[in-house]
Image: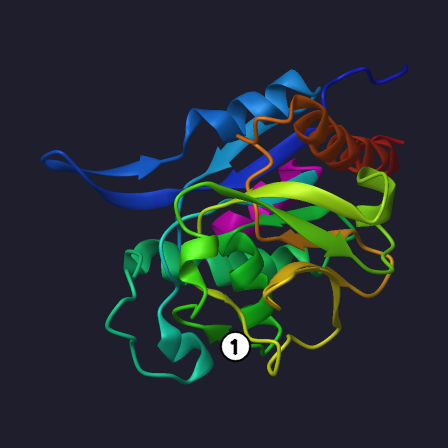
Amino acid sequence: MHNMNRPVIGLSMNYMQLGSYHQFHIRDKYIDAVYEHGGLPLPIPCLSDEAALQQYIDKIDGLIIIGGMDYPPDMYGEAVHPKADIMHERRAKSDPLLVKLILQTNKPVLGICAGMQLLNICQGGKLIQHLDTVDNHLGEKYHEITLTESRWLSQIVPGNTIVVNSNHHQGVDPKHVGKGFKVVATEADGIIEAMELEGEQMVLAIQWHPERITDVSHRKRMFEFLISQAAQQQKYHSD
């Protein structure tokens, strides 16, 4: 029978104190963007149990690593910068395991903002812990980026430039790009805005926030592309 179910898109989560309690947390915009463009959002709590995370990986057809606070710099051999805002260790422990497991599949991965930074770290890369040009990037600033030759991003974005929204104070260190990653978009000040992992699996890392960008056509293209890639994976394992 033809399977018309929505592709299942896993979403990493934040873990933080909100009010008097610690809570797993994900902004509505991520869930809504996945659901509105045909996916079934499945938030994955921060667990350091690899076998449990593997069960999630088996259930999903694609994965989004969401934005959030800063990954601990000891993950890439550096001391903490005074301006760093380090995430809770529950997320810092869980996320690299999720990445390790998803990279053993062919399922599509979209890393958004901190998610891009994590993918770089997991491939042996480093981050700039606080950008010199931070004022251009922090606080939902809209700015233009330039695309270079790419496999996936060029299918999503028409043309060689696009305006994106950014809210980040760290960035991928151009001198320490993770193994297998190719830079596919940059900002005029040299900040890396998008990378793709070479190979058959769609692994796209972007520094902006398509889930909440004001350009609805950009949001639509980004999430529809991810979900169509996930639908192909769904087809493979339902046959």
- Residue at figure coordinates x 59%, y 65% from the top left: 191
- Tell me if residue 56 is in the magenta stretch: yes
Which image quadrant: the N terminus?
top right
For badge 1, the amino acid type reads Lys
Question: In terms of secondary structure, what is the magenta stretch mainly?
Answer: helix
Residue occupied by mark 1: 126
Magenta-colored span: 49-61
| 221 vs 112: above or below | above
Say whether residue 117 is left or right of residue 17.
Answer: right
| 192 vs 214: above or below | below
The residue furthest left is 20
Pointer 1: residues within 10 angstroms few (<14), some, or many (20+)? many
- Residue at figure coordinates x 28%, y 56% from the top left: 88
- Residue at figure coordinates x 65%, y 55% from the top left: 205
The percent coordinates of residue 204 (x first, y second) are 71, 52
Say whether residue 48 is left or right of residue 226.
Answer: left
Quadrant in which residue 99 is drawn: bottom right
User: Can residue 110 be seen here?
Assistant: yes
